């Protein structure tokens, strides 16, 4: 009997056992980046959190049975403004930004989603939905705009559970003369000269472009269907974005729900405030990657439960780096991962409790370092294999020790901090293993060990007296 997987659903405000609509095809949609600038580490939080969920779902249901869709928003006011500012085309800006994003999240150990659809490639689907909404009297045309009529949906607001007046204040909704109600939101709007423009739906003559919310209803429909299992994003998207996605999809398809589980990560904060471009208190992933291994950045993110606010500090990042460093040093490179540890898995299955799962990793490491040091090799090997499988499920310990160490060594400070005392036993153990291989006339293995050490920046010198080593600077 496998462990129950429980997920917290923002819509019902409870942790529920996860049961997919179709276990052969588990479907998840997560709102992706608006590609106008480098992603900051706050933006990385949902990407990492939902990557862990993706890995867990693949583990439970089989990799080929999980479809993960994360969109790219490549039509937006901020994109138009930034392209004009930089004097480049919109396409150039979105392409460059997308490539940077891809490289950033790969460095953070995130698997590519199954589908990464772009809004501009789904304008046709958006127009179909808009036409349906107008036909169903859930939307109306006014002064070349198409607006969603919020009063047509009696349970609008169920996700955010906020009274209407609070929502109006929260959303800073634009009061426009063509709106029947202040809460009505834009599905389609006319394009100003120079802005991207498409033929409009609903017989509107002026060319136009979509509002923000409709793109996710269109892309999730195209790639996952009218209803699906999990919809995710940052907590700031609950209102108005996800509330409006629900309204659009349910009214267009006449369904009682859009997704069965609505999951939201908490904010990443700096000194108590949300990290954001508008507050100017942000660090880009790119900047951070210059000084820290991607794996440490990722791990730091997972040391806090995803629904809690996460305070970003250098100390915590260093703590994350040290832990990973210890683990890499402890586990031999040739360890083949087996099955994840049961208690570790139980923690992850409890609404993705990565904090608790990491506590279990700490426990296993302590056990390995103390008790098992004196145990038969087979017992140690079983623990390493179980540990590695568990860590891999979090997306860490995927490299080899030498690759990890080279990243550290490339940075002077970490190099000075970590190599001299702590590296000595490891290097000497490897030299002894090389000596044993040579004595057994296994020169291939001996050379492999020499290369492995060289990759870490350790140079060996053989002489009659034996082998000495130094660090190549
Ligand atoms: P954006 O590019 O602003 O549309 O945001 C992309 C994703 O990052 C969304 O899921 C946001 O909710 C999320 N996000 C933005 N800032 C933060 C933050 N400081 N902490 C956590 N998530 C964030
Ligand atoms: Zn969305």
Image: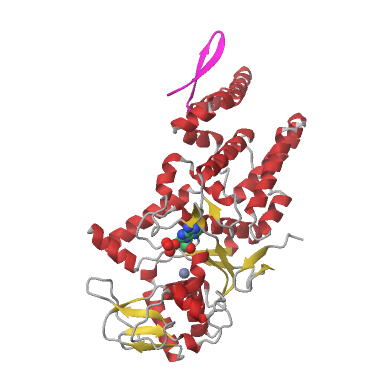
33 relative position to 338: left or right: left
- Residue 249 visible in this rendered orientation of the protein: no
Q: State the quadrant of the C terminus.
A: top left
215 relative position to 88: left or right: right
> Can you name the residue that lies furthest to the top here?
464
- Residue 137 visible in this rendered orientation of the protein: yes
Q: Position of residue 413 (x, y in %)?
A: 46, 31
What stretch of residues is rendered in magenta? 457-473
Seen at 62% across and 46% down, the residue is 391
Q: Position of residue 345 (x, y in %)?
A: 69, 53
Q: Position of residue 361 (x, y in %)?
A: 67, 44
Pick the front one: 219 or 234? 234
Q: Give the main secondary structure, helix, strand or loop, of the magenta stretch.
A: strand
Residue 335 to residue 431: above or below: below
Residue 465 to residue 252: above or below: above
Q: State the quadrant of the N terminus.
A: bottom right
Seen at 63% across and 20% down, the residue is 436
Is residue 461 within the magenta segment? yes
52 relative position to 252: left or right: right
Pick the front one: 253 or 209? 209
250 relative position to 412: left or right: right
Pick the front one: 37 or 278? 278
Residue 465 to residue 251: above or below: above
Q: Position of residue 296 (x, y in %)?
A: 53, 43
Q: Quadrant of residue 161?
A: bottom right
Residue 28 to residue 176: above or below: above
Seen at 52% across and 14% down, the residue is 462
Pick the front one: 34 or 274? 274
Is residue 338 within the magenta segment? no
């Amino acid at each position: 009997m496998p462990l129950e997987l429980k997920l917290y659903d923002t819509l019902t405000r409870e942790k529920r056992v996860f049961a997919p609509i179709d276990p052969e095809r588990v479907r998840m949609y997560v709102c992706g980046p608006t590609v106008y600038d480098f992603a900051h580490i706050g933006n990385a939080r949902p990407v990492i959190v939902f990557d862990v969920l993706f890995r867990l779902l693949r583990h439970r249901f089989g990799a080929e049975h999980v479809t993960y869709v994360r969109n790219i928003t490549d039509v937006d006011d901020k994109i138009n403004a930034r392209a004009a500012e930089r004097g480049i085309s919109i396409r150039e800006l979105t392409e460059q930004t997308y490539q940077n994003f891809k490289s950033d999240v790969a460095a953070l150990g995130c698997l590519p989603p199954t589908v990464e659809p772009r809004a501009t490639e789904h304008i046709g689907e958006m127009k179909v939905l808009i036409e349906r909404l107008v036909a169903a009297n859930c939307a109306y045309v006014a002064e070349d705009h198409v607006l969603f009529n919020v009063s047509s949906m009696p349970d609008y607001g169920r996700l955010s559970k906020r009274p209407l007046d609070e929502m109006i204040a929260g959303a800073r909704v634009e009061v426009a003369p063509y709106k029947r109600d202040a809460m009505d939101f834009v599905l389609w709007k006319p394009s100003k000269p120079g802005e991207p423009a498409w033929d409009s739906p609903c017989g509107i003559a002026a060319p136009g472009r979509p509002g923000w919310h409709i793109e996710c209803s269109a892309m999730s429909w195209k790639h996952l269907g009218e209803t699906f299992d999990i919809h995710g994003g940052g907590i700031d998207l609950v209102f108005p974005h996800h509330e409006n996605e629900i309204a659009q999809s349910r009214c267009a398809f006449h369904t009682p729900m859009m997704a069965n589980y609505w999951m939201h990560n908490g904010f990443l904060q700096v000194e108590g405030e949300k990290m954001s471009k508008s507050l100017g208190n942000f660090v880009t992933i790119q900047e951070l990657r210059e000084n820290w291994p991607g794996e440490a950045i990722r791990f730091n993110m997972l040391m806090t439960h995803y629904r809690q606010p996460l305070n970003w500090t250098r100390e915590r990042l260093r703590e994350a780096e040290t832990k990973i460093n210890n683990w890499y040093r402890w586990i031999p490179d040739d360890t083949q991962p087996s099955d994840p540890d049961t208690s570790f898995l139980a923690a992850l299955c409890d609404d993705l409790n990565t904090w608790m799962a990491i506590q279990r990793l700490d426990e296993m490491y302590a056990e390995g370092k103390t008790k098992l040091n004196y145990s038969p090799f087979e017992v140690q090997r079983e623990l390493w294999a179980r540990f590695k499988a568990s860590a891999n499920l979090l997306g860490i310990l995927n490299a080899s020790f030498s690759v990890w160490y080279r990243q550290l060594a490339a940075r002077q400070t970490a190099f000075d901090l970590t190599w001299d005392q702590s590296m000595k036993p490891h290097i000497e153990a490897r030299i002894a293993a090389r000596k044993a291989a040579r004595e057994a006339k296994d020169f291939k293995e001996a050379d492999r060990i020499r290369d492995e050490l060289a990759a870490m920046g350790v140079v060996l010198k053989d002489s009659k007296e034996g082998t000495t080593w130094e660090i190549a600077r």
